[in-house]
Amino acid sequence: MKIKRSKALLISAILGTLYSLYLISHFASEMFGSKGGAELAGAALATALVTPHMILVVLATIFNWVGYFSNKRGFALTGGILYSVGGVVFIIYIMFVIPSMVLSFVGYGKLKNIIEINNTSQASSQE
């Protein structure tokens, strides 16, 4: 018996992972690649401003992956909400989290049917 999972949640988690890796690598290279004092101060300020957005996106991605592998609706919903809050916290980068946010909510909605299908196929295989 194969367990069915949400494709929307998988795509959302993959996009969130890619975006999280981009954010972390971009701001880490800015911090550690700075040459002068003023450049370092500017990179530190930019990183400090974006850090709450980064934390929320990374947490949302983790919740997406847990929701995908466990087929639990609450994790998918939490991931979508965290993407939403992350977009609002740093509104300039909201366009990067909108696809993941929408797919998280779609995955949350579809998980109800997926869970029912998994339960009925599991019950029929036990008979």
Image (cartoon, rainbow, N blue to C red):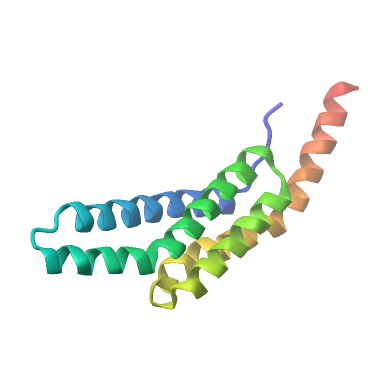
Check the picture and name the quadrant holding the N terminus.
top right
Which residue shows up at 57% across the image and 49% down it? Answer: 64
Q: Is residue 127 above or below residue 103?
A: above
Kindly give the residue lying farthest to the front in the view shown: 37
Residue 35, percent from left and from top: 8, 58
Q: Quadrant of residue 53?
A: bottom left
Check the picture and name the quadrant holding the C terminus.
top right
Front-most of residues 98 and 119: 98
Kindly give the residue lying farthest to the left in the view shown: 35
Q: Quadrant of residue 23?
A: bottom left
Kindly give the residue lying farthest to the top in the view shown: 127
Q: Is residue 36 above or below residue 119?
A: below
Residue 96, percent from left and from top: 41, 67
Front-most of residues 106 and 121: 106
Q: Is residue 22 above or below residue 70?
A: below
Front-most of residues 8 and 21: 21
Residue 93, percent from left and from top: 39, 72
Which residue shows up at 63% across the image and 48% down it? Answer: 6
Describe residue 105's horizontal placement relative to residue 15 as left or right: right
Describe residue 31's horizontal placement relative to residue 66 as left or right: left
Which residue shows up at 46% across the image and 54% down it? Answer: 16
Describe residue 6's horizontal placement relative to residue 1 as left or right: left
- The total of numbered circles placed on residues is 0
Which residue shows up at 73% across the image and 46% down it? Answer: 114
Q: Is residue 36 above or below residue 73?
A: below
Residue 8, percent from left and from top: 57, 54
Kindly give the residue lying farthest to the right in the view shown: 127
